[in-house]
Structures are given as C-alpha cells and as structure tokens.
Amino acid sequence: MKIDIITIFPEFFNPFLETSIIKRAIEQKIVSINAHQLRDYSKNKHKKVDDTPYGGGAGMLMTLQPLDDAITKLREKNSKVILLSPQGKKFTQKKAIKLAKESHIILICGHYEGIDARIENYIDEELSIGDYVLTGGEIPAMIVSDAVIRLVPGVIHEDSSEEDSLQNGWLKYPQYTKPNDYKGHLVPEVLLSGNHQEIMKWREEMRLKNTVLKRSDLLKNIKKSDVQAKKIEEIKSNSKKV
C-alpha cells in the first residue's frame, strides 16, 4: 500500500513515521508513506497557499491551484483521494477495513478556515474523525493512516486485528494479565481454569456486555443472531435492576 499526504507541515509526520508498527511496516516495505509540502506546488512567488474568501469573513482559505497540482502529480490509476474535513462522513473501523484494500491513498490536510469549496471536484470523498474541529488535518491523517495500515496483510498478526474492538462491530471482551490478584482485584476464575470452551463462552458474553453497557449506539448497525439478541435483552434487563 502507498499513502501520500499533502500538508503544509510535513515535519509533523516525522515522529509518526519513525515509531512502532508504522516504522516496521515501512522498513519491511509493506507500506510506503510520504508527506508532501503543499507549498512546493504553489505558483505564487512567495509560495503562498491561502487567500481571503470571496464575500468576506474571518481568516484565510487554502487556494485550489497548489492542491490541484499536487493531486495531479501524485494521482495514479487506482488512487483514492480523501479530504480530511469535519464536514466529511465519519471515519469508522468499517471504513478502515475498506480502505486497507486500496493500493494508493492520497490524504489532504486542510488548514486555516478551510479550503476553496471547489476542491470537491478533485477528490473522491471527505472523511471526518469526529464531530469537533482541529487546527488542521495532520492529526486526522495520522489517525486514518494508523487505522488503515495495521489492517494491511503482513503488518500485524491477522488473529490480533480480527479480535480488535469494532473490527466486527462489537467491542472487545475484557482482558487481564499477571498477577491474578492485585490489591484484592481478582482475574475472573474462568480465565484461570484452562477450559478453552468455557473461556470462549465467557468472552462472547463479555463482548456483548461491553458493547451494550459502553457503546449501545453500535448495536443498531450490527447483524445479530437470535442467541445474541436474546442475550442482549438479558444484559439490558439486568443493568436496569442494578
């Protein structure tokens, strides 16, 4: 997979590209990530990439010319061009899974008061990481890149990603490590039993319980079996009695 990031702060990504799983994926040539300085594409003699908005208003807008030229230079036959924006569709694990199948992604980091609205003619979609506004698209670009890269085959063990929270819509079951007794807080006995069938049964129940009690909003988008639906109603009923 190849990811190109268009930004006015390419240095922002240096620590990100030099750390942990991302660094290893790059070194193993599983992924290629490059941050490109937008100002390099500006035809303005001062390398400006912003201007005042028509109709007035506070702040400056990013101009089209540098972005158009950068996208044109970087775009390939199968490229997916994405603008990171609070107006975009919300980025989810489901979207990350889909993007992980792409061969080339171009991420555009906005700044200032936004981008000339005609950018919509040059992108494939807009994505938002949440309902809030940041100073720029660099952090969202890192979030999208991280979420997508870890799903690319060979980056991490497949079994690990398959059990992640939200991978299949559900939250993950609780996990514990040594010691089994920490200041009176005990690890559930079933996890110490060695009975793998009972452990799997417990994990499935706790996965449902975690989702119901912590993120019930996810349930409407999850396809549930009759057994799961019945168990969910039991969990909801028991939680009301507490």
Image: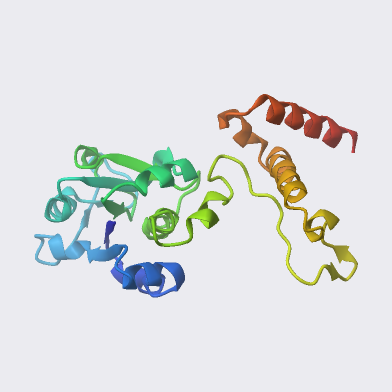
Q: Which of 183 and 106 is in front in this view?
A: 183
Q: Where is residue 160 in the image (x, y as percent from the top left)?
A: 54, 57
Residue 106 placement (x, y as % from top left): 26, 52
The answer to whether 25 appears left or right of 92 in the picture is left
Residue beneath the point at 28% across and 64% down:
32
Residue 50 position by quadrant = bottom left
Say left or right for 137 vs 40: right
Res 106 seen here: yes
Q: Which residue is drawn at 16% across and 51% down?
A: 75
Please identify the quadrant where the N terminus is shown.
bottom left
Which quadrant is the C terminus positioned in? top right
102, 92: nearer the viewer: 102
Is 120 displayed left or right of 152 in the figure?
Answer: left
Q: Percent x, y for residue 166? A: 56, 45
- Seen in the picture, residue 138 relative to 28 is either above or below; the reply is above
As drawn, the residue found furthest toward the top would be: 226
Determine the residue positioned at 53% across, 45% down: 167
Provide residue 229's location: percent of width, then percent of height: 70, 27
Residue 136 visible within the image: no
Q: How is the image coloured?
A: rainbow
- Closer-to-camera residue (195/131): 195
User: How many marks overall?
Assistant: 0
